[in-house]
Image: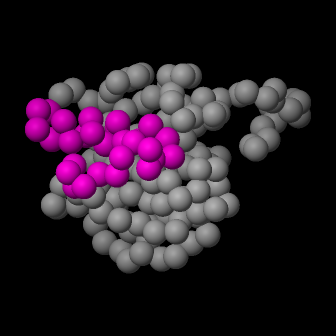
Amino acid sequence: MINCFFEDGGKARVGLRHVTVGAIAFNDKEEVLLVKRSAKFSRPGKYSVPGGFLDRDQTTREAVLRELKEETGYDGEVVSLFQVNDDPNRPKEDRQNVDFIYLVKVRQGKYVESDEITSIAWFSKESLPSEDDFAFDHRSKILKYFDYLQNPFTLPILGKA
């Protein structure tokens, strides 16, 4: 549970929405990088895009690159903001986070084990795990990205897509 406090020192009420970031991290083969969540988090053993909460004094762009590095060991370059999802009724989402999803080109690095992730893997559109294997609604975002590669459309997507 995240505890938030306002400027006057008052504690924020339960249910306050938070900002999260996610990276649709891709390589030259048009594969996407997914992480498998560890037992220390909700939905352990499920896939998600690299991501997490926005830290204080960070932009969403900085946060997504930080999360990619922390969770995978890879450095990346933000290509574009892909989607801002503020839908309070996202499936598999218990906190109603407002999610900034970026397209990130993976540049270099090497997987470094952490207590947040049990493994990472690259997936093509054809090899993408099933919806049941995902912790959140990221599979639909990734499929939308593959659609974008075939028939580009205006970015970013705002709201539910």
Q: Position of residue 84 (x, y in %)?
A: 42, 30
Asked whether the viewer can see residue 67, the reply is: no
Magenta residue check for 148: yes
**Left or right relative to 97: residue 29:** left
Q: Residue at x 29, y 51 (%)?
A: 128
Q: Position of residue 155 (x, y in %)?
A: 26, 30
How many labels were placed on the picture? 0
Compared with residue 102, is residue 25 higher up or lower down, i.e. above or below? below
Q: Position of residue 139 (x, y in %)?
A: 36, 42
Q: Residue at x 55, y 49 (%)?
A: 52
Q: How is the image coloured?
A: one colour
Residue appearing at x 27%, y 35% in the figure: 144
Query: Where does the magenta region start and end?
Result: 124-152
Residue nearest the viewer, comparing 145 with 139: 139
* Residue 47 highlighted magenta (yes or no): no
The quadrant of the picture occupied by the C terminus is top left
Please state which of residues 80 and 127 is positioned toward the viewer in this rendering.
127
Q: Relative to residue 30, is residue 110 drawn left or right? A: right
User: x and y percent of residue 88 in the render?
Assistant: 56, 22
Question: Is any part of residue 101 visible from this angle?
Answer: yes
Judged from this view, the residue extending furthest toward the left is 150
Residue 10 occupies quadrant: top right
Left or right of 63? Residue 111 is: left
Q: As rendered, which of 114 and 18 lies closer to the eye?
A: 114
Please identify the quadrant where the N terminus is shown. Answer: top right
